[in-house]
Amino acid sequence: MSEQLDDAGRLKHLLTLEGMPRGVLEAMLQRADALAEYAHGGSEMRDALAGKAVCTLFFEASTRTRCSFSLAIQRLGADLLNFDASFASTTKGESDLDTLKTLEAMGVHGFIVRHKMDGAVAALARSALPGTVLINAGDGRSNHPTQGLLDMLTLRQAKGPDFSAMKVLIVGDVNHSRVARSDLHALHALRTGEVRVCGPASLLPDDDTLHGCVVGDDFDAMLDGVDAVMMLRLQRERMSEGLVTSLDDYHRDFGLTMARLRRAAPDAIVMHPGPMNRGIEITGEVADGPQSRVLQQVANGVAVRMAVLEALLA
Amino acid sequence: MSEQLDDAGRLKHLLTLEGMPRGVLEAMLQRADALAEYAHGGSEMRDALAGKAVCTLFFEASTRTRCSFSLAIQRLGADLLNFDASFASTTKGESDLDTLKTLEAMGVHGFIVRHKMDGAVAALARSALPGTVLINAGDGRSNHPTQGLLDMLTLRQAKGPDFSAMKVLIVGDVNHSRVARSDLHALHALRTGEVRVCGPASLLPDDDTLHGCVVGDDFDAMLDGVDAVMMLRLQRERMSEGLVTSLDDYHRDFGLTMARLRRAAPDAIVMHPGPMNRGIEITGEVADGPQSRVLQQVANGVAVRMAVLEALLA
Amino acid sequence: MSEQLDDAGRLKHLLTLEGMPRGVLEAMLQRADALAEYAHGGSEMRDALAGKAVCTLFFEASTRTRCSFSLAIQRLGADLLNFDASFASTTKGESDLDTLKTLEAMGVHGFIVRHKMDGAVAALARSALPGTVLINAGDGRSNHPTQGLLDMLTLRQAKGPDFSAMKVLIVGDVNHSRVARSDLHALHALRTGEVRVCGPASLLPDDDTLHGCVVGDDFDAMLDGVDAVMMLRLQRERMSEGLVTSLDDYHRDFGLTMARLRRAAPDAIVMHPGPMNRGIEITGEVADGPQSRVLQQVANGVAVRMAVLEALLA
C-alpha cells in the first residue's frame, strides 16, 4: 500500500485497494458518482487533462478494460497512446522496464498497465520517475483496483453508502481472480456487514485471502438473504487443469439461475465483471433480468476511471 | 427498411439503401456534397459531434473503410474508439450482442459495424438502446450503404442530379458484392434511366436482385453508350470455388481496357470500390486514366460518412 | 536530396539527411530545441496543425517510432490515423502506391512512412500529389532522418552547437543500420571535427558510406578521447547469417563497458537508438550510468518530430 502513497499520504499511483483507508475510498466513490453524468458524453470535463498524455500499456490483452480507459482518457481531454505490449518491441528483447522508461521519456504522464505477473505493475511503479502515475489495470491474480471501485460504486448506488448493513456474496473461481481480490479488499475497507464466499474448494484460495469471510460450497445455503451476488467468470481452462469436472457440473452447483436467485433478498442485485459465460456461471435470464447490474457496472467503469485519472493526474 | 426509421419517418440507423425514399437519399447527397470542402481538412465542423463517442466495431477486417470513417469521425470532433472484434474478447466466447451492449453501456453513441453475416448489423440494431445509432459498414453480401451513397455522389458530381437520364453499367461479381447491391438499391431509388448488369452467369445472382436491370454477359455490347461503368473487384477465391476458369479468361471477357472503354459514351466515367486488381478486372491505364473517378470515390467517402454521422448523431 | 526540395529550395518532404544544407539542419535543430519544452505536455502548440490529418503508414512494424510520432502529431493538434500496412489491405494485393493514393484521396495531409525496402519512401514521394508531405521513418538500410536529427540534437545539447570541435565514434553493425547512415549524413553536413567508425569488418559497409571517417576494429583504441560514443543495436540474426561468431565474442570485442568508457573523454556521452541489448553491445551499467543520454535521445525524438511536422505541414 505504501508504494502508492506519498509522504503526505496522497495517492501517487493506484496499484491495489488493499489497505486503502476508508476515507480515501469513499471520496473516490463520491467523485465517481458525481462524474457519472459526464461519463457518457459531453465536453464539460475536456480541460481536466488537456495537454497530458496517457498510455494504455497492456502486457496482457484486454479489449474491454482498454476501451473503458480509452473513453475515460478522451473525455478528460488527454492525449491517448495505445501500446499493445504483447505485439511490440518487447519481442525485440526489450525489458518491460525499458519500455516504460522509453515511453516516460517521450513525455507520457500516466500509464494504465495490465500484466500477467503478480506484482509487475507495482515493480514498474517503483522505477518510475517522480510525477509519473501508474494505474494498475490488472496484475496476475492479485489486483484489479478500478474493477473493485466500480463494483463498490454499483453496490453503493443500489444499496446506499452504508456498507455495514450489507450482506455480499462472491461466487466462483476466487483463487484465480484479481477481481475477487480487489472486491474483497474494498469490501473490507468499507466495513461491509457480511462478506460470504462460495465456490468449489478447488477454486478457493487456501491462504488468508478469505480472512473475515463466511466461506462455503453450498451455493443455495450461501445465497440466503444476501443483498448482492457477485458472480465470477469461469475460465474454461480450469477444466483442462482438472479443477472443475465439467461445465455441466459447475453450472449445476455454482450457476446462478432465477430459481436460485429467489433465495437472496427480494431486492438483491446481481453483478458480473464480464465477459459472461451465459449458461455456465450465470443464465441469460438472470444476466438480462431486472436484478442484474451488469451493464451498470460497465457504465460505472468509465466514471470510476475518470475519477481515478482526475485524482492522480489533474 | 422500417428498422432504420422511427415513427416519424426519420432515419435512426443506416442499415440499407433498399427502399430508401428518394427525397431522403437526395438530401443526404446534397449535404455530403456541401461537406466535401470540409472533408479534407479544416476545423470548421469540429463542434458537430463534440463530446460524443463513436466506435468502429468491425467483426470483419477492413482497413480502408475503417480509415475513411475514422477521419470523418475525427473531423466532426467526436471521440473515436477502434474495436477490432476479430481479435477481441469475442474470442472469450462473448456474443456480438454482449459486445455491443457493453460498449453502449460505456457511453458509446454511434457504432460503425461491419460483419461477415448478412443481416447481422440490422439484428444488432434491433437490440440497441433508443438513442444508439448503428451505421452498417458492410454486412455479408447484402449491404454497404455508405459505399452506395459515395458512388451516387460521384455519379451526381459527374453527370448532374438527374439520374433519369443516365445509363449505368455494373460489371463483375455482383452475386458476392454488397457494394453492387447497395448501388442497385440507390440507383433504383434515384430512378436511374437504365441500369445494366454484366458478368459471367456464375457470378450473377439468380434471385430478384437484378429486377429492373438489363442483364447480359457480352461486355462489349453492354458498354455501348453508357455514362458510367462501375467495375467490381474480383476476389481470387472465385477461382478455387470454380466460378471463374482463370484470371486471364476473366480479364479477356470482363476486364475493362482502354479499347473497350471507347464503346461507352465519350464522357463516360469509370468507378471501382477498391482495392483494384490491376490487370484483372481493370487495366492500370484505365484505372489511372482521365475517365477514372476511383480517387474521387475515395474522397467522397469521407464527405458521405460525415453527412451520415451528422444526420444520425448531431 | 533534390526530391525533397521544391524549386525555391524549401523542404517539401523529409526523405534523407544526405546532402542537406548545414543551415537547414541547424535551423531544424534550433527549432526542435525550442519545442522541447512543449514536447512533454501542455496545450500551447495545439493549434499548429489543427484540422490536418497525419497518417503513420508503416509497411514495417515499429512501435517506438510510431509512438513518438503519434505523440508529436497529437501535441500539434492534428488528427491521427494509424495504418499498419503489414496487416492491412495490402494483403488484398493492393500496391503500396495505391494505398498511399487512397489515403491521400481521403484528405490525409502528411504521411509518416516506414518501409523495409531502400528507396521505397522516396519512390512514394515522387508519386504524391503536390501538397502531400512524406516523412521517412526508416527505409531499408538507407535512411532514418528523424533519428539522425534527434541524435544531433542530443549531441548539440551536450556539447554545444559547434560540431567542428567534436570527436564522435559510431560502433557496431553500420552496414545494416539506417540509423548509422543518417547519423553519418548529419555529422558530415554539420562538419563534425572527427568521425570514427568501429566494428567487425563483416559488419562495416565496403562502399563509400564511410568516406571521410576514421575506420578500425580496435574498439579500445578508437575510444581514445572521443566526446560521444554512438552504439548501434546488434540484431541477433547477424549470428545465423554468420556475420558474428557469438554474442559473447561480440560483447568482448565491441560491447561498451564502464572500463572501456574510461578511455573516452571524461565528459563523453553515450548514445544508443534503442531498444538496447543489455549485456551485448552495451552493459546495463553504462546504459543507466551518468554518461548515458539514451533517454534524452528518446525525449528529443518527440521534439524533433514536432519540429519536422511543423516545418513541413504548418
Image: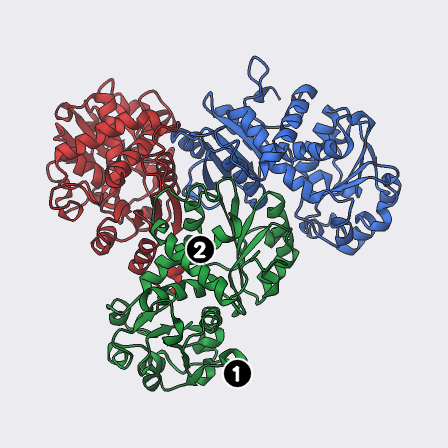
Chain colours: A green, B red, C blue
- Other-residue count near label 2 (Cα within 10 Å), few / some / many at <14 / 14–19 / ≥20: many
Q: Residue furthest top?
A: C8
The amino acid sitting under disc 1 is Asp
Q: Nearer the viewer, residue C167 or A7?
A: A7
Dot 2 falls on which chain? A
Residue occupied by mark 2: A305
Determine which quarter of the picture holds residue A172: bottom left
- Which residue is located at x 77 percent, y 52 percent? C283
Identify the disc placed on residue A206: 1
Q: Nearer the viewer, residue C248 or A272?
A: A272
Q: Return the x and y of residue C54 as percentages of the image width and height.
A: 47, 33
Mark closer to the chain start, 1 or 2: 1
Q: Nearer the viewer, residue C264 or B259?
A: C264
Q: Are marks 1 and 2 in contact (CB under 8 Å)?
A: no
Between marks 1 and 2, how big is the CA–CA gap?
A: 32 Å
Kind of element beneath mark 1: loop
The quadrant in which the N terminus of chain C is found is top right
- Other-residue count near label 1 (Cα within 10 Å), few / some / many at <14 / 14–19 / ≥20: few
* Left or right, residue A189 beside residue B299: right
